[in-house]
């Protein structure tokens, strides 16, 4: 059983404030591509942390819950914690594995199954590794993930995602770097559209 927390609410400064989830690669937006990747590994619920998109209609597949970190733009660690807190309100959470990922990796559907297979093969957390550890591309058991998120002190901002998730001691799973490439600039977007 699996759920997903998808981060989709950053400022995208290097993209002139453009809404990353709405960027199109191929025939689909980044959020649609990320949702499809989560669905394909069997996610039964997807929590999207970011402003609800007026254009979004959930395709056939798991339901989507929208939430925001408080305050908005408090950083990705706070966004992960907000997504996990929203998931806690659903009975699915108990005993689930939770995929945690950002919505700006257009080819994540090629590597998320590799992580899911590794997660199924053993206990504990797994995190993707390319040239470095990809802290926003991992799968974690619900209870330990919930506990580290709940331990964040109130009122903080811009904490390190690595510092949040490293206490889970995830197994590192090497994946194709192309599947974990994210879009931070217009050059990144152009490159993704050419692949």
Image (spheres, grey):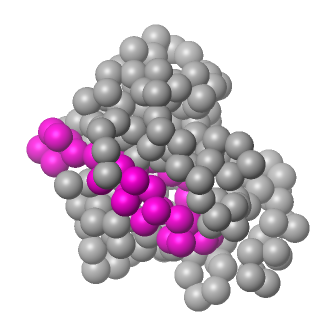
Residue displayed at 50% across by 71% down: 109
The vertical placement of 33 against 14, above or below, is below
Percent across and percent down for residue 98 are: 34, 46
| Stretch of the chain drawn in magenta | 91-120
Question: In this rendering, would 132 be left or right of 16?
Answer: left
Work out whether residue 91 can be spotted: yes
Question: In this rendering, would 139 be left or right of 33?
Answer: left
Q: Is residue 97 magenta?
A: yes
Q: Is residue 109 magenta?
A: yes
Residue displayed at 40% across by 38% down: 125
| Quadrant of the frame with the N terminus | bottom left
Work out whether residue 56 can be spotted: no
Residue displayed at 74% across by 49% down: 131
The vertical placement of 154 against 39, above or below, is above
| Quadrant of the frame with the C terminus | bottom right
The vertical placement of 10 against 143, above or below, is below
Percent across and percent down for residue 7 are: 52, 49
Question: In this rendering, would 105 be left or right of 12?
Answer: left
Q: Nearer the viewer, residue 1 or 60?
A: 1
Residue displayed at 82% across by 75% down: 191
């Amino acid at each position: 059983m699996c759920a997903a927390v998808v981060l989709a609410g950053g400022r995208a400064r290097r993209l002139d404030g453009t809404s990353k989830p709405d960027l199109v690669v191929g025939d689909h937006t980044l959020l649609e591509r990320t949702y499809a990747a989560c669905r394909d590994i069997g996610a039964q619920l997807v929590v999207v942390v970011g402003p609800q998109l007026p254009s979004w209609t959930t395709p056939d597949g798991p339901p989507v819950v929208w939430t925001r970190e408080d305050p908005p733009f408090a950083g990705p660690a706070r966004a992960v914690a907000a997504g996990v807190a929203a998931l806690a309100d659903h009975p699915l959470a108990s005993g689930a594995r939770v995929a945690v990922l950002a919505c700006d990796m257009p080819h994540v559907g090629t590597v998320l199954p590799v992580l899911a297979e590794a997660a199924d093969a053993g206990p504990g957390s797994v995190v993707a590794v390319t040239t470095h550890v990809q802290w926003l591309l991992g799968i974690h058991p619900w209870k330990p993930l919930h506990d580290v998120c709940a331990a964040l002190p109130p009122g903080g901002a811009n904490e390190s995602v690595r510092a949040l998730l490293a206490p889970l001691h995830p197994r590192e799973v090497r994946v194709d770097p192309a599947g974990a490439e994210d879009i931070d600039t217009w050059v990144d977007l152009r490159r993704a559209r050419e692949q």
